[in-house]
Amino acid sequence: MTRTAALIASAFLAAACGSSVAAPSQGSPQPLSGNLSVFAAASLTDSFKALGHSFHQQYPGVTFQFNFAGTPTLVTQIEQGARADVFASADTANMDRVKADGMAAGTPRVFARNRLEIAVAPGNPKGIHELKDLGRSDVIYIAAGPTVPAGKYAAQALAKAGVAVTPKSLETDVKSVLSKIELGEADGGIVYTTDIKAAGAKVLGVAIPDQTNVVATYPIVTLKASPSFAQAEAFIAFTTSSQGQATLESFGFLPA
């Protein structure tokens, strides 16, 4: 069996078992090289760049190309033939769409979870303390579009809280929501806790109680048309390993 074949077999065995994969740093990693194109939800931007850096240290011959965008935008690009090896979604619905299209190789694996938080300007000048405040007439509320996972999760949280509010604008991804709040173009928006953490002092996070919060589920899969199948499987194994999980948790993600 060749080294590449051995790596693929190992990755598939780990996926079949459904357990965490040992980090590639344990022992001597199999030599891999070539390009790896990862299509990932916008909320994964910082954490996946860090994962890519750590993975590259283990496999210096692998060159990354990341494409971060709203999850449905990524799916459309994949459906239209964009070169992609790995797809990481911010929800199961869009992953199901990829599976239904026959584009997923194997069974997607959940690698992280996330929670929602209200993003407001530093100092909270509008006094937004709970979800119902987003419905006030003096508050400019924006959200990700209804097909974007963050937008769907936000709508679910508002519905659980019994809040009816129409966003002043609908954004293509959660990072765009955060950007407009940072620029003062909106007063509040519902984003992920990881986005609040990444923004630092640029925004303030207002916690959403457990009874009205929504937990986001993130699955990942190698795409069937991938020309870098072994590299893709190795990256997913790294992401779901103890080292990869520790990296994700350092950015505020919940364990898978």
Image (cartoon, rainbow, N blue to C red):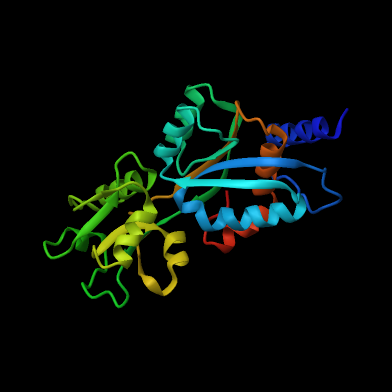
The spot of residue 200 in percent (x, y) is 44, 71
Q: Position of residue 181 (x, y in %)?
A: 30, 64
Q: Is residue 232 above or below residue 179?
A: above
Q: Is any part of residue 208 visible from this angle?
A: no
Q: Quadrant of residue 6?
A: top right
Name the image quarter holding the N terminus.
top right
Q: Is residue 110 visible?
A: yes
Residue 134 vertical placement versus 164 (above, below): below
At a point 48% along the width and 44% down the height, the residue shown is 217
Image side of residue 37 versus residue 8, left or right = left
* Residue situated in front as seen by the camera: 70 or 9: 70
Q: Taking 212 as reference, is 255 left or right?
A: right
Q: Which percent across, then down, holds residue 80?
A: 45, 27
Residue 151 location (% of width, % of height)? 32, 47
- Residue ID at (39%, 55%): 175
Vertically, is 182 above or below 242? Answer: below
Asked whether, in this view, residue 4 is left or right of residue 243, the answer is right
Q: Quadrant of residue 248?
A: bottom right
